[in-house]
Amino acid sequence: MSKVLVIGAGGVSSVCVHKMAMNADIFSEIHLASRTRAKCDAIAASVKQRTGQTVSTYEIDAEEVPALTRLIQEIGPKLVVNLALPYQDLPIMDACLAAGVDYLDTANYEPKDEAKFEYKWQWAYQDRFKQAGLMALLGSGFDPGVTSVFAMWLKKHKLKTIRQLDILDCNGGDHGQAFATNFNPEINIREVTAPARHWENGQFVETPAMAKKVAFDFEAVGPKNMYMMYHEELESLAKFLPELERGRFWMTFGDAYITHLTVLQNVGMTRIDPVLYQGKEIVPLQFLAAVLPKPETLGATTKGKTNIGDIATGEALDGSGEKTFYIYNICDHEDAYAETGNQAISYTTGVPAMIGAAMMLTGAWTGQGVFNMEQMDPDPFMDMLNTQGLPWQVKELPGPVEF
């Protein structure tokens, strides 16, 4: 029985808080704060209607460290779950250190003025958290998060080493909009338009954004074009799988999405540097995010499934030579909406955030310092995925991927 404070009130937070309320034996008291209290109140009302559980709400600017520290101290949670924007990670970590509370997030830090995300800023907090006797768990979403746990489960149960790893993220859902992003538009577009990077032979290799495309037939979705991108779990996987020769991340996009994004990029709407408009500075991407459909509003119209997983090749644990395994989850948009009022993109991130929090609060995962998912025992997390709406399956493939 533990008290928790969740920061952020988007779709991921909505899913996470709903699932926390459905596990009241672990999350005995839920507090929710964001810049806009009305969004917190809407989530709390839905949780009350669906589960009967009460969620306390607050208004807070997560970048105002003294005010956030005071709020954490007033509430007295055992854990702060950061589901705000990635560039708010560091101030929230600072507030947790000041208040003496453990920390969890789903995405690594990214500066506001540069589309670059990496773990160095948060890994630099290792000594401070360790000396304070506190634990910070980074990246407890799906990718990053579950995809890293998938890899470590394979290494624990199937493969002695992982030589090649491909992470495949497919959203086969259709929301009926001409153009919309399935999670925060600002973060999504910054991520997609950044140069691609993959791990190969001990170093990262950079290529132009969206330059490499291959087709893949996804179970329950069908054939989709997927594009090689950079994603933060490649950095932590390369660190914690020292034998890894090649690691890549792939995400599917439809032709209409690519066409819209190309036009927006060509006309400057994806810029993150301020421009002067009628005497005021505005950031084009932030303006674009304001006029695009909100991801949390897409649940009612989104149909179809997601399929996200890892394909790993390496030396088999049983000594039978090299083997390749595909481990993945299939999630239905309509099922996710029926349970939590949110589409599957939010669901597949919000559920692992809740599970990571449960791992920490129940003592299944413990430590002092800053940790990535790869450093934890995958088994209890994998068991909870099966009982909390994200069942997974694993199958052996004839050989390594050919793309």
Image (cartoon, helix red, strand yellow):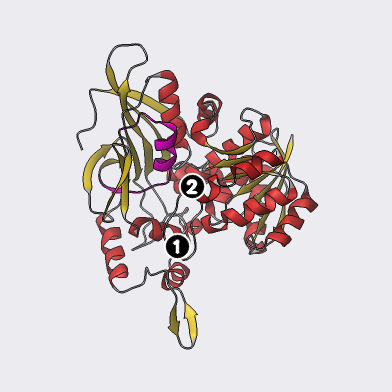
Pointer 2: residues within 10 angstroms few (<14), some, or many (20+)? some
- Residue 214's spot in the image, x, y percent? 21, 44
**In this picture, which residue range is highlighted in magenta?**
225-245
SS type, badge 1: helix
Instruction: Read off the residue under disc 2.
Output: 119
Viewer-side residue, 389 vs 264: 264
- Residue 330 in the image: x percent, y percent? 40, 36
Question: In this view of the protein, which residue sits in the foreground, 116 or 336?
Answer: 116
Residue 52 in which image quadrant: top right
The residue singled out by tag 1 in the image is 186
The residue lying at 67 percent from left, 56 percent from top is 33
The amino acid type found where label 2 is placed reads Tyr
Q: Can residue 341 be seen in this view?
A: no
> In the rendered structure, which disc, 1 or 2, sits on the residue that comes first in sequence?
2
Q: What's under tag 1, amino acid-wise?
A: Glu
Q: Residue at x 32, y 48 (%)?
A: 197
For the residue labelled by badge 2, is the local secondary structure a helix, a strand or a loop?
A: loop
Front-lying residue, 332 or 207 = 207
The reply, left or right, for residue 160 in relation to residue 129 is: left
In this rendering, position of residue 2 left or right of residue 151? right
At horizontal 55% and vertical 33% (from top left) the residue drawn is 388
Q: State how far apart marks 1 and 2 are (Cα).
A: 20 Å
- Residue 230 painted magenta: yes
- Residue situated furthest bottom in the rendering: 278
Front residue of 285/241: it is 241
